[in-house]
């Protein structure tokens, strides 16, 4: 059984073309024996934003802390600690932090997607 | 895209033989079009405890809030907000709340396991 604080894992800066203020961690992945799906934790700094993008795999998201918005169907929707989001495959999405604290999200993807 | 607070979903009381003080919610499941894995949120009340058990599917767990312990390999291990746990298939496990607040955990299972 793997038991650790997610903050024990070294974060990677996400350097997508239009993303700012994002770090990501693979907290449960193939190296841990998780062969069906992968858990990542992303921290988005205040005013940080991800790239607007889509891909062939889904996201299951749980917002752990902070306040922000997610872009879907041409609009921004509020998210906060305790919000869950299901992004189906091939759906355009984008997240941004609109608060003063870190926006921390747990994000699960299938194992055939890139882990980070 | 599904966007909701997990608390908007009606909780179910978990009535396993030896469990006390547990409610569960399927927050992203087959009804939402999630066909590969299922996200649940469990709330364990102070002094609440799950059944000690094992099963043929894995858990990926993120502790959202509270303090507690997880049983593994004959010992109890501390968990708290920000702890991640990977429980491989067929491994005995049990959770208990050792704090004064709700212990809230996000728990992902593969889609061929029972959702709740």
Image (tube, coloured by chain):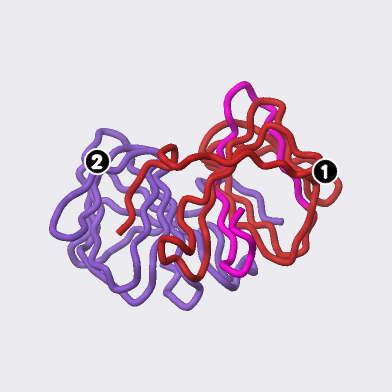
Chain colours: A purple, B red
Quadrant of the snapshot with the N terminus of chain A: bottom right
Label 1 residue SS: strand
Check residue B101 for magenta coloring.
yes
Q: Is residue B23 shown left or right of residue B95?
A: left
Residue A103 lies, in percent from the top left, at 33, 43
Q: Residues within 10 Å of mark 2 (few under 14, many from 20)?
A: many
Q: Residue placed at 15% from the left, 53% from the top?
A: A75
Which chain letter goes with mark 1?
Answer: B
Question: Is B36 above or below relative to A11?
Answer: below
Report which residue position mark 1 lands on: B75
Q: Is residue B85 shown left or right of residue A48?
A: right
Q: Quadrant of residue A51?
A: bottom left
Residue A52 lies, in percent from the top left, at 20, 63
Query: Looking at the image, do the residues carrying marks 1 and 2 touch, with CB atoms under 8 Å apart?
Result: no
- The residue furthest right is B74
Q: Residue placed at 29% from the left, 38% from the top?
A: A67
Check residue A26 for magenta coloring.
no
Report which residue position mark 2 lands on: A46
Quadrant of the snapshot with the C terminus of chain A: bottom left
Front residue of this view, candidates B24 and A43:
B24
Gap between marks 1 and 2 measured at Cα: 40 Å
- The residue furthest top is B100
Residue under disc 1 on the same chain as residue under disc 2 = no
Q: Residues within 10 Å of mark 1 (few under 14, many from 20)?
A: few
Residue A102 lies, in percent from the top left, at 33, 40
Q: Residue placed at 73% from the left, 66% from the top?
A: B56
Q: Which residues are magenta?
A: B93-116
Which chain letter goes with mark 2?
Answer: A
Question: Is A8 above or below relative to A109?
Answer: above
Label 2 residue SS: strand
Residue A60 lies, in percent from the top left, at 42, 59
Question: Is A77 above or below relative to A74?
Answer: above
């Amino acid at each position: 059984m793997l038991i650790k604080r997610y903050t024990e894992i070294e974060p990677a800066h996400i350097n997508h073309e239009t993303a700012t203020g994002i770090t990501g961690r693979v907290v449960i992945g193939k190296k841990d024996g998780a062969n069906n799906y992968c858990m990542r934790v992303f921290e988005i700094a205040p005013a940080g934003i991800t790239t607007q993008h889509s891909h062939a795999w889904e996201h299951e998201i749980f917002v752990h802390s902070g306040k922000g918005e997610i872009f879907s169907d041409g609009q921004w929707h509020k998210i906060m600690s305790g919000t869950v989001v299901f992004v189906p495959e091939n759906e355009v999405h984008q997240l941004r932090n609109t608060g003063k604290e870190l926006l921390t999200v747990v994000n699960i993807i299938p194992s055939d997607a890139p882990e980070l």
